[in-house]
Structure formats: C-alpha cells, structure tokens
Image (cartoon, rainbow, N blue to C red):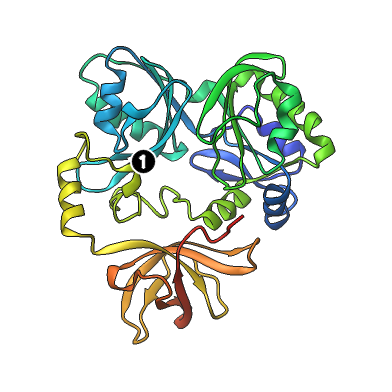
Amino acid sequence: MKTTALTDVHIKLGAKMVPFAGYKMPVQYAGINAEHDTVRKSVGVFDVSHMGEFILKGDKALDLIQRVTSNDASKLYDGKVQYSCLPNEDGGIVDDLLVYRIDEKTYMLVVNASNIEKDWNWISKYNTEGVDMKDISDRTSLLAVQGPKAAEALQSLTDLDLASMEYYTFKKGTFAGIDNVLVSATGYTGAGGFEIYFDNANAEAIWNAIFKAGEPLGIKPIGLGARDTLRLEMGFCLYGNDIDDKTSPLEAGLGWVTKFSKEFTNSTALQQQKQEGITKKLVGFEMIERGIPRQHYEIVDAEGNTIGKVTSGTQSPSLQKAIGLGYVNKDFAKEDTEIFIKIRDNKVKAKIVKPPFYKN
C-alpha cells in the first residue's frame, strides 16, 4: 500500500483508514454525515494526494494534449483549468482529467489515482513529437479545502486574492510561507473552495497552517466517504463507477467536453455515434419508495424487464433521500420517467431526475 505524506497525521486524528486505488486513505474521521454537513455549510479539508500529476512541456505539448483529450485545450489561457476526457480507441474512456495551462508550452494534467500508470502509458504512446513528460505524482501533495467558508479560512495564509478567483482558474504564489504553491479554484463537492498543490516536504506544515487559520470557522478533516456523497449529490461522474473503458463520453452526458472542432483519439467514431444517436444514457434518479440503490443493482421497468444498471447510489445526507446514477435504455431517460431498482429481488420505485440533485 502506498501512503501520502500525511498518512501519520490522519492516523493520529483517529481516521478510519482503508485501501483505495493502491493507497492507504482516510475514509472518515467523525462520521460521513457529519463531515458531509461540514463541507456543505462551513469548510473541510480532504487529503487527495493520491491523485496523479503529469507535466507536459515543449513546443508540441498542446498538440499532444489536443490529440489525446476530447475537449478543446486551445481555448485555455495561462491560469485556466479545463475538465476533459482521454477517449480510448474503442468508444470508451481511458480516464477523466483536469488540464492546467501553466504557460503556452507547459501544462499539468491531473488524473485519477487508480489510472496513473495506465494514463501515463496511454499519453506516452501518442507522444511522437518529443514532448517532455514528467510524472510528478509521487512528490506532489494535494489538499482540497472545500465549502462556502474556504476562502475566508485560507485568505490569511496567502497574498493571492482567493475570493476573486473564478471557478476553474488557478494561481501560483506563496502560501503558508511556502513559495511556488499552486492554488486552484476547483473541487469535486459542488460546495466551492480550492485545491492546493505543493511538494510533499511541505505537507505537514501546510496542513497545520490551514487548520490553525480555519479554527475559528470550525474547519475539520474530511474523508473519502463524504467526498463520494458530496460528488454524487452534484451528479459528478466517478471513474470506475459511472464512466470506464466501455462507456462513451456521449453516453455519460459528457458531450460538453467532447469537441468535434478538432481531431482526437476515436473522434470519427464518436462523431458518428453522435449523429446516429446513443442507445443508453447515464441518468440521475431518486428513490420514491424506501431503499438505497447500490452499484451494479439492476434497473427494471414496471414489468420487471432489465433496462439498465446502477453505477453509483447513496442516501443523500443533504436531501435525506436515496439518490443514484445509472445507465438506462434511452427510451427511459426522460425526466420524471418511473423506473424500479431491484433491491434483494424487490422492485423499488424511483424516478428519473436531472442532476445536480442538490441545488444551492
């Protein structure tokens, strides 16, 4: 099991540690519901240092990114972040990722922990023009400070104006007395906040500084359990659950990051799929009858015919109702359509709703 630079800190704080994507990670501290509530109402800190970071540098860096990602990275400017996909050659998704433009010839790609090696090999395969690639994952720590009070909690630690930072932009500067820290107005919770990238050597100092600065606002450490319930309330896809090597970005509702204004891996086939229409679609649903949907549960129609499968599901702490994502035959994808989730051989009634489930 790999560990992050803060593993010992989590253990001292009494976190329940679990294996996740090859890492030993904190799943919860005080409890998932309490931690979820902290992020929605105040501010919480996730250690997400297991994520992967690649630096791509050189005259052809943008060309390589354009070739392997579905979104149009030519629209980026210095300090801008973009959500994108790495399509495979068979209509599926290698991974979803963030693309950071540091300058005209330098980019950072942030990928999922479970896919670091797979993504590296995939991008390298297309690197025919000598782009300088560096995998900095093992030396980079990442904290996600999320919640409506995040800017207020962090502002005393930096001269960067956090409150004025637009969503999906980033700045580099001094943070908690440490130079060259990247602060990004991104996150996976829908609660607002920042993601902070820095060298492992500074992990404990930055963690302690954040908790000291945020103490008056009731800042708390948050585990991966609440990260999952928070992202699901927003309808954000989780790789390995809602998207994978066999789901197309169009089926997953990621047409908005699939730009046919350029050529990229498998773009011709995906464009054809767009023209012909998809046969299944990722939808959100909420339970009408009691029951919690879980990954792999069957979705059926009123007659009990299988029409799809649940990919993510939970009892939403904010909404006090069970919600989920899943793929269904496109005839059943319309809002308010009645569907049933098979839970222990029982058909439990649900209806299609449009994410996000939680609206501020």
Q: Residue at x 76, y 24 (%)?
A: 156
- Quarter in which the C terminus is drawn: bottom right
Compared across the picture, whether 167 is left or right of 213 comes to left
Residue 230 image position (x, y, % from top left): 59, 52
| Secondary element at tag 1 | strand
* Any part of residue 343 in sight: no
Q: Residue at x 39, y 72 (%)?
A: 298
Q: Residue at x 46, y 75 (%)?
A: 351
Looking at the image, the residue that sits furthest to the right is 216
Compared across the picture, whether 219 is left or right of 168 comes to right
Eyeballing the image, is 137 above or below 97?
Answer: above
* Any part of residue 129 in sight: yes
Residue 248 image position (x, y, % from top left): 28, 51
Compared across the picture, whether 55 is left or right of 43 comes to left
Q: Residues within 10 Å of mark 1 (few under 14, many from 20)?
A: many
The answer to which image quadrant residue 77 occupies is top left
44 and 22: which is toward the camera: 44
Eyeballing the image, is 348 above or below 37?
Answer: below
Residue 90 image position (x, y, % from top left): 20, 46
- Give the amino acid type for the residue marked by disc 1 in the picture: Asp
- Quarter in which the N terminus is drawn: top right
Residue 172 image position (x, y, % from top left): 57, 18
204 and 198: which is toward the camera: 198
The answer to which image quadrant residue 211 occupies is top right
Mark 1 lies on residue? 95
Looking at the image, the residue that sits furthest to the bottom is 303
